[in-house]
Image: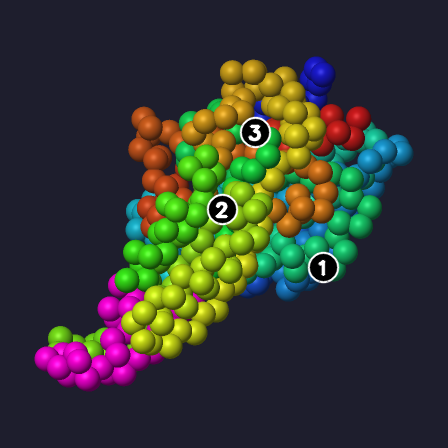
């Protein structure tokens, strides 16, 4: 397995990698609007001699390094979009765009895959390397939109990474099977009859129905899911009424359901609707439910994952590789699941937490940041996977 080509980054490479990440962090862009990011990626890859397809699913890019010898085809992916969050950090590379922030590490994903591209541009690979820079991962269907254009045609395997503050820098989480949950969203409107707060008998109160529903929905976790499986139902938004003495006509609830289990995934919409209909009938209100499936569980294919563990162990040492426990699974979601549903591959968590430097904020926090030493780990891991798979 030894491959001397997967060397540590030089000082110049590391400095360029960090500079790229900070530039992207300072200029975040939301889903399907990643035009500056895409232009930077295109310019860098074109200079390296990659063949480019641009404008895929609005702003997506596919870059190909033609095979020098016959072999398989491997796709490596990075997501480009930021989140609608006002950054609270005070560091010098903080977001310069009001209300938009790279709060999930996608800036690091792009920067590290660009470094991988640089290190592989002149490599003697057997087979074709495909680099996918994807828009709109954060719940906006970017993976499916790119796949629909045929980018997986001829691809044999796929690999992606996520910088992860749930693991210390230097660690790599590579579990087999489900590693991230399915993501569903629900938008629910309860409509009753409003009236005076002092005379509730003259109303049909949607607020009380909504309060009952918040609790009742938890039975989908506590009474309809095995304790050995994982399921989450969260109401993240509840709006009803505008003043203290008026019972409102309408209440709205919005939230998410998460699961790994394939049976629960199939059954959740029906179970959810049954609880909603039951509570609505009990409280004599009308319910309008919009239940949306954002992405399926992210499931690592065991054989490719075992291969990726061997690569990571060889490059970073076996102590760096985590296969179970904290940092190897999450109820968060990831639309790389769409790639893994269609091709064998794996999705790795690259540790980016540094307690000593205070880099511990969770993903999607307005103070999120990560240890930039993790960028080189990500770049070298992807490089190692590519060199070994296309050898």
Could you give the CA–CA distance between mark 1 and mark 2, rounded to whole angstroms? 25 Å
Residue 281 appears in the figure: yes
* Residue at the spot 71% in from the left edge and 51% down from the top edge: 62
Left or right: residue 16 compared with residue 22:
right
* Residue at the spot 59% in from the left edge and 34% down from the top edge: 177
Residue of label 2: 259
Rendering coords of residue 68 (x, y %): 86, 34
Residue 148 bears which disc, if any?
Answer: 1
Residue 243 vs residue 391, the one in the foreground: 243
Report the mark closest to the observer, 2 or 3: 2
Task: Tell me whether the residue at label 2 lies in contact with that at label 3, contact meaning CB atoms closer than 8 angstroms.
Answer: no
Residue of label 3: 174
Under circle 1, the secondary element is loop
Q: Earlier in the sequence, mark 3 or mark 1?
A: 1
Q: Earlier in the sequence, mark 1 or mark 2?
A: 1
* Residue at the spot 68% in from the left edge and 25% down from the top edge: 307
* Residue at the spot 22% in from the left edge and 82% down from the top edge: 203
Q: Earlier in the sequence, mark 2 or mark 3?
A: 3
């Amino acid at each position: 397995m030894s491959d001397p080509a997967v060397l540590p980054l030089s000082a110049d490479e590391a400095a360029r990698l960090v500079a790229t990440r900070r530039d992207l962090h300072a200029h975040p862009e939301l889903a399907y609007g990643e035009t500056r990011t895409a232009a930077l990626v295109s310019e860098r890859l074109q200079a390296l001699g990659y063949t480019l397809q641009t404008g895929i699913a609005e702003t997506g890019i596919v870059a190909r390094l033609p095979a020098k010898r016959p072999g398989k085809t491997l796709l490596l992916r990075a997501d480009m979009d930021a989140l609608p969050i006002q950054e609270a950090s005070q560091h010098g590379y903080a977001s310069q765009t009001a209300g938009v922030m790279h709060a999930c590490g996608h800036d690091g994903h792009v920067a590290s895959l660009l470094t991988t591209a640089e290190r592989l541009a002149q490599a003697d690979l057997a087979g074709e390397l495909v680099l996918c820079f994807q828009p709109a991962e954060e719940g906006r269907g970017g993976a499916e939109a790119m796949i629909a254009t045929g980018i997986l045609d001829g691809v044999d395997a796929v690999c992606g990474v996520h910088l992860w503050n749930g693991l210390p820098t230097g660690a790599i989480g590579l579990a087999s099977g489900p590693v991230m949950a399915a993501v569903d969203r629900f938008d629910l409107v309860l409509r009753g009859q409003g009236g005076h707060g002092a005379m509730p008998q003259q109303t049909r109160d949607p607020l009380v129905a909504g309060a009952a529903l918040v609790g009742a929905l938890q039975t989908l976790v506590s009474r309809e899911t095995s304790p050995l499986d994982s399921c989450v139902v969260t109401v993240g938004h509840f709006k009803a009424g505008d003043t203290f003495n008026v019972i409102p006509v309408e209440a709205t609830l919005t939230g998410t359901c998460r699961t790994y289990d394939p049976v629960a995934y199939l059954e959740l919409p029906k179970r959810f609707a049954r609880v909603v209909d039951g509570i609505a009938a009990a409280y004599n209100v009308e319910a309008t439910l919009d239940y949306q499936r954002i992405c399926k569980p992210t499931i690592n294919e065991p054989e490719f994952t075992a291969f990726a563990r061997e690569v990571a162990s060889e490059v970073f040492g076996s102590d760096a590789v985590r296969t179970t426990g904290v940092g190897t699974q999450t109820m968060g979601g990831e639309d790389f699941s769409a790639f893994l549903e269609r091709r064998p591959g794996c999705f790795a968590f690259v540790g980016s937490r540094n307690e000593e430097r205070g880099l511990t904020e969770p993903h999607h926090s307005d103070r999120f940041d990560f240890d930039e030493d993790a960028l080189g780990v990500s770049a070298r891991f992807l490089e190692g996977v590519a060199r070994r798979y296309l050898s």
